């Protein structure tokens, strides 16, 4: 994502041979049970841009969705995270890929898009239309799925009216669709140099932990 600084297993089934060269059926059964248990986990999909994808970090586990998976595992909650972030993604790009992305059954959908639209000066009405279409696609495909919207902001240099309308867009979408909202994803991270990479845009691993906390404060109520 290119924008200015803002105030923003597989299960491996263990085939253990006994002394006579036969498979230990007990351990095979245990492993199969573990595989089935993992398949029973509910799915949280994070759908977004480079902030979700973890641009510039050593691995995906350091991105905020990965940090949330670690927290979920530590609490022994029956959820697994799918990171569907694509660097540089716009709301239009997200809308173009939402249909095939939803081929994977989900229980919770976390939507993080719009920042790249804002920094390109895309009309707020167009971004709103795209985000609404994504939300509608999720609701239509999985009516019981919960949706969490992650709000973003653009710098004041984009103009007071535009930046204000852009910020308000997320609350309006959340209210209209009766879904939960994280008002500003990069709260306590955006604009703080030590928590961002050299580009001043993408959070460091430490910054991503704070971003994860911002999301978790609302997401935990959905689990």
Image (spheres, grey):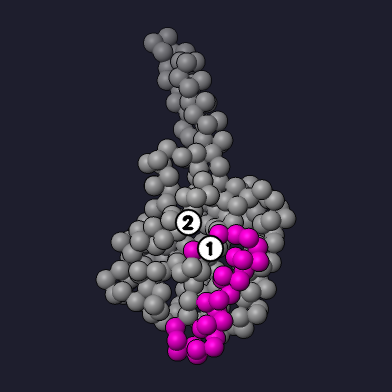
* In the depicted structure, whether residue 180 falls above or below residue 20: below
Marks 2 and 1, how far apart in space? 7 Å
Q: Earlier in the sequence, mark 2 or mark 1?
A: 1
Residue nearest the viewer, comparing 141 with 222: 222
Q: Are marks 2 and 1 in contact (CB under 8 Å)?
A: yes
* Residue at the outermost right position: 140
Q: Secondary structure at mark 2?
A: helix
Q: Which residues are magenta?
A: 155-182
Whether residue 50 can be seen here: no
Give the number of callouts.
2
* Residue at the outermost top position: 20
Residue nearest the viewer, comparing 217 with 8: 217
Residue located beneath label 1 in the image: 181
Query: Residue 218 — which label?
Result: 2
Whether residue 183 can be seen here: yes
Q: Residue at x 41, y 13 (%)?
A: 18
Q: Residue at x 48, y 35 (%)?
A: 11
């Amino acid at each position: 994502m290119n924008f200015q600084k803002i105030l923003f297993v597989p299960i491996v089934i263990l085939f253990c041979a006994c002394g006579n060269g036969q498979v230990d059926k007990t351990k095979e059964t245990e492993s199969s049970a573990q595989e089935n248990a993992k398949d029973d986990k509910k799915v949280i999909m994070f759908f977004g841009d480079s902030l979700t994808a973890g641009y510039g970090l050593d691995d995906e586990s350091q991105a905020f969705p990965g940090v949330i998976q670690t927290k979920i595992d530590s609490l022994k909650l029956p959820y697994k995270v799918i990171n569907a972030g694509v660097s540089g993604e716009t709301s239009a790009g997200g809308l173009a890929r939402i249909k095939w992305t939803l081929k994977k059954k989900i229980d919770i959908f976390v939507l993080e898009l719009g920042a790249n639209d804002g920094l390109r000066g895309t009309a707020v009405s167009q971004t709103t239309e795209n985000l609404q279409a994504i939300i509608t696609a999720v609701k239509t495909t999985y009516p019981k799925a919960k949706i969490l919207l992650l709000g973003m902001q653009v710098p004041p240099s984009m103009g007071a009216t535009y930046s204000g309308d852009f910020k308000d867009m997320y609350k309006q979408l959340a209210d209209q669709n009766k879904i939960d909202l994280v008002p500003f994803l990069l709260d306590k991270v955006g604009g703080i140099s030590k928590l961002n990479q050299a580009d001043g845009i993408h959070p460091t691993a430490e910054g991503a932990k704070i971003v994860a906390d911002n999301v978790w404060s609302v997401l935990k109520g959905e689990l």
